[in-house]
Amino acid sequence: MPKLLQPKTLYKVVKELARPTASVRKPDGTMASTHAELQRWRLHFENVLNYPEQVITDEFSSENAIQLDINTGPITGDEVSESISNLKQTVKQRESMAYK
């Protein structure tokens, strides 16, 4: 059986849903009411939000790449234990610094 809303909660929900939609305000805080004002705001946001798509080029080459010695094999139990130990030490250090 669905939970019924309390009258106060129901009133708040209806009031929120029934309120007028957001309107455009001028810089001085008054409502933009004329068609020309609304058109000006529309053009402003079109210019701000609709910029040409940027072309992304791939300028990376393998001859300039730095070779790193990284183990990409399966994670071992020793690595997990070492990571957990390091995390515990970091937490202890931060806790001790917080209480100083």
Image (cartoon, rainbow, N blue to C red):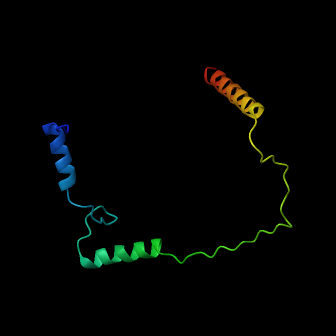
Toward which corner of the image does residue 10 lie, by quadrant?
top left
> Is 34 drawn above or below residue 14 in the view shown?
below
Q: How many marks?
A: 0
Q: Which quadrant: the C terminus? A: top right
* Residue 89 as seen in the image, left or right of residue 33: right
Observer-nearest of 48 and 37: 48
Q: Residue at x 31, y 63 (%)?
A: 28
* Residue 28 as seen in the image, left or right of residue 16: right
Toward which corner of the image does residue 33 lie, by quadrant?
bottom left
Residue 12 image offset from top left, x and y in percent: 19, 44
Observer-nearest of 21 and 66: 66
> Is 36 drawn above or below residue 93 in the view shown?
below
Toward which corner of the image does residue 86 lie, by quadrant?
top right
As drawn, the residue found furthest toward the left would be 7
> Is 63 drawn above or below residue 67 in the view shown?
below
> Is 97 drawn above or below residue 65 in the view shown?
above
* Residue 47 as seen in the image, left or right of residue 17: right
Q: Residue at x 25, y 65 (%)?
A: 31
Q: Residue at x 17, y 49 (%)?
A: 14
Q: Which quadrant: the N terminus? A: top left
Residue 38 image offset from top left, x and y in percent: 29, 74
Q: Residue at x 46, y 71 (%)?
A: 49
